[in-house]
Image (spheres, rainbow, N blue to C red):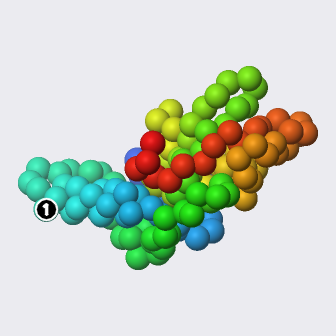
Amino acid sequence: MSVAFRRESDDEHLEPRFERPIPAGPNLVTSRGLAHIQDQLAQVEARLAGPGLDEEAIKAARRDLRYWSTRLATAQVMPPPEGDVVAFGAVVTLRYNGRVRTVTLVGDDEADPAAGLLSFTAPLARAIMGAEPGESVDFGGKADAVEVLAITLPGAV
């Protein structure tokens, strides 16, 4: 029989479901980031234990469970920064493109750029890492594009 007359199953046309991507590199977290991971894991476990989930919802919850379990197992809680140079966990006030902005360098799962929480793996975070107040660093192909104005410790803002 010709392949043209073969009935394909409906499953052959479904989009494949992939695992949630785990960011490359170490899983550095703040103490708040660790609490966030633990909270997300607890929410997924509660969702799985609850009634009324269809098969797709169960598969999605299990994917989330694998992701958050891995993130918890690999979390490396970093000590608070000392505050003399830009480091993981520091609150940094900077000037970029004429705008003053304050960001906190956090882990990938805690990042929320709109809220000023910048992943330590973000290009801007990598550019300012190790800089001191008053220092300008290159960014986006421009020399001295970002000026570090101040560094404070978390909770001291």
Q: Which residue is mark 1?
A: 49
* Quadrant showing the C terminus: top left
Indicate whether 111 appears above or below 73.
above
Report whether residue 81 is seen. Answer: yes
Q: Nearer the viewer, residue 16 or 127?
A: 127
Q: Position of residue 13 (x, y in %)?
A: 48, 46
Please state the horizontal and vertical placement of residue 62, each as a whole percent of the image.
31, 63
**Percent x, y for residue 1?**
56, 56
Q: Nearer the viewer, residue 22 or 155?
A: 155
Regarding residue 5, the answer to whether it shows in the image is no
- Amino acid beneath label 1: Ala
Disc 1 packing (10 Å; few <14; some 14–19; many ≥20):
few
Q: Residue at x 20, y 51 (%)?
A: 54
Q: Quadrant of residue 137?
A: top right
The residue positioned 73% from the left and 31% from the top of the image is 96
Q: Which residue is painted at 50% across and 69% down in the image? A: 78
